[in-house]
Amino acid sequence: MALFPLRVFLGGTFVYAGIQKLSDPGFLNAHAPTYIGTQLEGFADGTPGGPLLQPALSHAAAAGVGVAVLEILIGVLVVMGVLTRPAAAIGLALNLVLFLTASWHTAPYFLGSDIVFVFAWLPFVLVGAEGQPTVAALLTRRPDRLRRTSERTLTRRALMTHALGLAGLITAAAAAGATLARGSYRAPPRPRAGRRPGDLGPARALAPGDSQPYTDPSSGEDAIVIRRPNGKLYALSALCTHAGCRLEYDRDALTCPCHNSTFDIRTGAPERGPARRPLATAAVTEQEGRIVARPLQTS
């Protein structure tokens, strides 16, 4: 029973991971910073697991959708306690591949979550959901009349069918959300009335040492403008070039909370992996008391 909370966490996390991929408007958009193809290239660059990703690189969109659907199915099966051991084995394999690719350059290694997930899956590969609450166990606790009915109908095949149906519904809902999101992705937000594109607001509103998020006027990409303590302004993409996670400003560098990459604020160059490509940057100036940024450019 001590493993039950871990099982629910792993299953729920995999369901969420699959939905998050399918609902990301940039996941299948080759021009977006979170495009799965760009992520896979970053994962494969200089890592021991890079050759494992080569087949996926030539069919990035199909591979991305396939992994997302597989994650949802694994999560549903594990939460229900159906086919737990094979589902956990596949989950372990996925996280092992991610450890050998996505988080390989994370230093120290324990800051990368994938190696932790590998060992978290291991008990369920060995013993499954033995002794824990499962859908089958809950249904067999019904009153005798219902239990006799459920015993005749509750087979592993039936449970698998229900699990697949639930996973299909979740996937369809996520895919529908992704379709709606992608339909509006290419149109960057309109600037506020009376403000020209690239106008980030009054210069006095951004104090030395502070930052302000904004949307790049040409691409619609998340960006950030930073005023250093000496008053100098810098504008950069706010999305990590490794896996598209949103960066955080900590006064000395831009840091990725997903895999701990850091970027130089002045140039956008990666200072610590696993990210290897620099951030897009933008020329930014003060004009008539306002901060104005040009479109992001990749160096």
Image (spheres, rainbow, N blue to C red):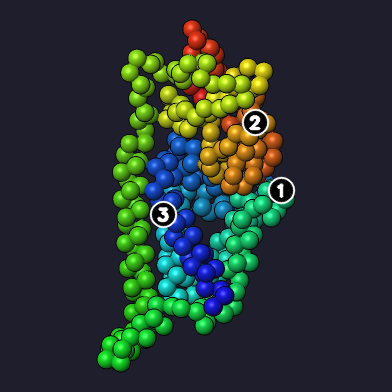
Q: Residue at x 41, y 83 (%)?
A: 137
Give the x, y percent position of residue 36: 48, 46
Relative height, residue 243 to residue 297 (above, below): below
Q: Residues within 10 Å of mark 1 (few under 14, many from 20)?
A: some
Residue 19: which disc? 3
Q: Nearer the viewer, residue 206 or 258?
A: 206
Relative height, residue 196 to residue 126 (above, below): above
Quadrant of the rendering where the C terminus is positioned:
top right
| The quarter of the displayed image where residue 260 is located | top right
Q: Earlier in the sequence, mark 3 or mark 2?
A: 3
Residue found at the far top of this picture: 288
Q: Which residue is mark 1?
A: 107
- 271 lies left or right of 175: right
Q: Residue at x 35, y 30 (%)?
A: 187
- 121 lies left or right of 75: right
| The quarter of the displayed image where residue 273 is located | top right
Q: Residue at x 38, y 16 (%)?
A: 195
- Residue type pointed to by label 1: Ala
Quadrant of the rendering where the N terminus is positioned:
bottom right
Q: Nearer the viewer, residue 299 or 74?
A: 74
Give the x, y percent position of residue 114: 61, 57
Q: Which residue is mark 2?
A: 251
- Residue type pointed to by label 2: Arg
Under circle 3, the secondary element is helix
- Residue type pointed to by label 3: Ile
- 122 lies left or right of 244: right
Under circle 2, the secondary element is loop
Tell me how far mark 3 sits from mark 2, CA to CA: 33 Å
Label 2 near label 1: C-beta < 8 Å? no
Q: Earlier in the sequence, mark 1 or mark 2?
A: 1
Relative height, residue 141 to residue 242 (above, below): below
